Amino acid sequence: MERIGVTTARDFTDLDGLACAIAYTELLKLEGRDAETIVPEEINASVTKEIKGWGLEYKKQPSPETHTFCIVDVSRPQFIPDFAINNAIEIYDHHEGSENFWLQRLGNRAKIEKVGAAATLIWEEFKKRKKEKQISQTSAKLLYGAIISNTLNFNSKMTSERDLKASEELSKFTDLPKDWIEKYFSDIEKYTQKNPREAIINDVKKGYFDELGKNISIGQLELWDSKKFVLKNKKLIGEVMKSFGSRFWFFNAPSISEGKSYVVTKNKYIKDLLLKEFGIEFTNGVGKTNHLIERKEYVTKFMNL
């Protein structure tokens, strides 16, 4: 039996990518198929110490007998692992911009849809294939947590009714306490306070935007109170972001408790771009939005200019 690899982005792995990869591997196995989860890069701060203790199973590289891949939570070719890009048989993602590329290659096996979390798409696959009642506690908790994380506890403008429905349905298959969401974001906060450099490094996406003719690095940390982190670590943020090799960078920090995002950059081009497209004004290198903005909103906007 041919083994299928389920994998995600090559730069870093957040909770959504990890959850989708592990849960979709489980779904394939429930259907009697041989499958393995491959997470090629380090997992970032969105995967807390508690979640790491849930008995997660994945590999860093595919087994020799694995030649075809399902790709989750990523669709831009430049972010996909080399071993998977030309051997993909399915893709599930919620990031816009590469729909035509995958439609030509995979047809209806490319599911790139506008939802807040790719985890929502994977849960919907469990339901379509009549396997929802067989989902494990671990996969249910991972998918639920991924939706909470990626929608900023449903405060993101990218949140859809499908995300809300999926989280409600998944919650019935978990044993998480009522205060779990608050604890989850609190755990991320504690980790980033202790390991600010590592937290920043492990959540930076680098990409070339044809529409702008620029390589742009975008860092992000989703925190309960990101204002404190940004003001305390502004210098460090600049040092880390510059180390990724592009003059054009910015760091986005959604502050969930405030319902707004803080943005750090020193580059005039980026400041002007964010002012024009998002109305963000900067004082001493720090900008503030009037609502929560996620990185994928910036990326979507830049790809459609």
Image: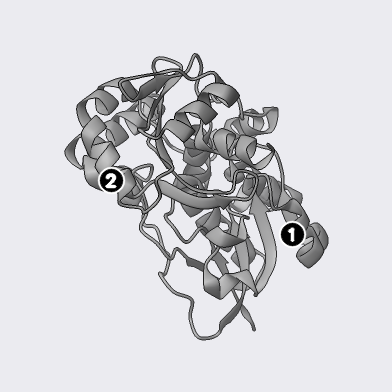
Q: Which residue is mark 2?
A: 240
Tell which tag, 2 or 1, sits nearer the viewer.
2
**Quarter that holds the N terminus:** bottom right
**Quarter that holds the C terminus:** top right
Residue 168, image x, y percentages: 59, 30
Q: Amino acid at mark 2?
A: Val
Residue 129 in sight in this render: no
Q: Which residue is mark 1?
A: 101
Residue at 25% over, 43% down: 239
Q: Amino acid at mark 1?
A: Phe
Mark 2 and mark 1 residues within 8 Å of each other at the beta carbon? no
Residue 117, image x, y percentages: 58, 40
Mark 2 surroundings: few (<14), some (14-19) or many (≥20) residues within 10 A = some
Q: How is the image coloured?
A: one colour
- Residue 214 numbered mark, or none: none
**Up-down: is 39 above or below 303?**
below
**Up-down: is 48 above or below 59?**
above
Residue 283 in sight in this render: yes
**Residue placed most toward the observer, 2 or 230:** 230
Query: Residue reaching furthest front?
Result: 268
Residue at 66% over, 29% down: 160
